Amino acid sequence: MSHASHTLFVVVGLNPTLDVVMRVRGPAFGQLNIADKSAAFASGKAMNLARYLAQLGNETLLLGFIGRDEAQHFITTVESSGAHQQFTILDAPTRINVKIIDSDTGQDTEFNMRGARVTPEELAAVASNIQAALPRARAIAFTGSLPPGAPSDIYARWIRQAKQAGVPAALDASGERLRLGLAEHPWLVKVNWFELSQQVEEHAVTQERAIALLREWIAGGTEIAVVTRADRVILATAAGVWQATTPRQVAQNPVGAGDALLAGLLNGWGRALPPAELLRQACAVAVSSVLSMDPGSFAPADYEAILPQIEIAPIGDTAP
């Protein structure tokens, strides 16, 4: 599938990780747990997103940091997926995140490191790569956590720059990064239920409240707003609101499902799909991704099998 250079998707993430994933039967604290299956992956939200986008046939450029010792492994992983990278190399090691998945229930527990501290000069190097990429970008996505040393408004500032350059900016973040980013009215926002409830400081957000919040974001200038829950995804645009119900799967590795969903949304938007079909295809990418142990890839056969199982329903006064 060939695309002209202006169809480039730029992905920015500042906190990559080496993901160590272990499947353990009935994991327990305070005792030795032996993994049935384990693997280590070059990962992080931006890394996963770039790989999914490339697998979907999009020209993709990944920008951000990587530790010098792990750089070659990460570069090989990105480039073997078909994506391009322009990493800013750090002298510090890349953080390690450990994911323990209960083989019986599929429930996962995560232990995440914060990442190496970055300097203003290192951040400026990424900023200049972003500036250079904007003229040929179809859209740009800012995703994931920030390493120590990165100011919490950095995504907000970069969203503003992208908008000034006429490039749609997508945001997938949580906490303060999300709050400050939302104030810039990014073109696309994807959050999960917990991140949404954090924003409004409410413990239990009802579906009605969630939809009202998405509609507020749309009224403020965001074009696509998405919130995810375990078995459902709600998408809002100016044309209305749709809900997808997804089939339950026993996850090999649930890490990366949100990144796969975002890749599916960007990919479908790039192909001008109507909202309901955009949502269906994005959900199929996300659900098929959990069947792969490797965050950042999915099997096309799983995608084809899952696509017809995604149920889409309009909510409220939705235009056809």
Image (cartoon, helix red, strand yellow):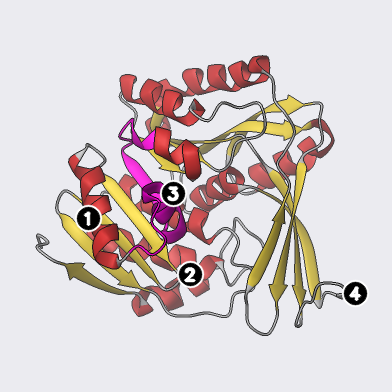
- At label 1, counting other C-alpha atoms closer than 10 Å, the crowd grade (few under 14, some 14-19, many 20 or more) is few
**Amino acid type, residue under disc 2 in the picture:** Val
Quarter holding the C terminus is bottom left
Residue 196: say if magenta.
Answer: yes
**In-image side of 88 versus 48 (left or right):** right
Q: How much space separates mark 4 and mark 1, taking CA atoms?
A: 47 Å
- At label 4, counting other C-alpha atoms closer than 10 Å, the crowd grade (few under 14, some 14-19, many 20 or more) is few
- State which mark lies toward you, 3 or 2: 2
Residue 263 in sight here: yes
Magenta segment: 181-205
Mark 1 secondary-structure assignment: helix
> Could you tell me which residue is drawn at 33 percent across and 30 percent down?
184
> Could you tell me which residue is drawn at 66 percent across and 61 percent down?
294
Instruction: Please say if 302 is above or below 140.
Output: below
Check contact, mark 3 vs mark 2: CB within 8 A. Answer: no
Mark nearer the N terminus (2 vs 1) = 1
- State which mark lies toward you, 2 or 1: 1
Residue 165, position in %: x, y?
34, 20
Residue 25, position in %: x, y?
76, 82
Which disc, if any, is residue 1?
Answer: 3
> Could you tell me which residue is drawn at 48 percent across and 27 percent down?
153
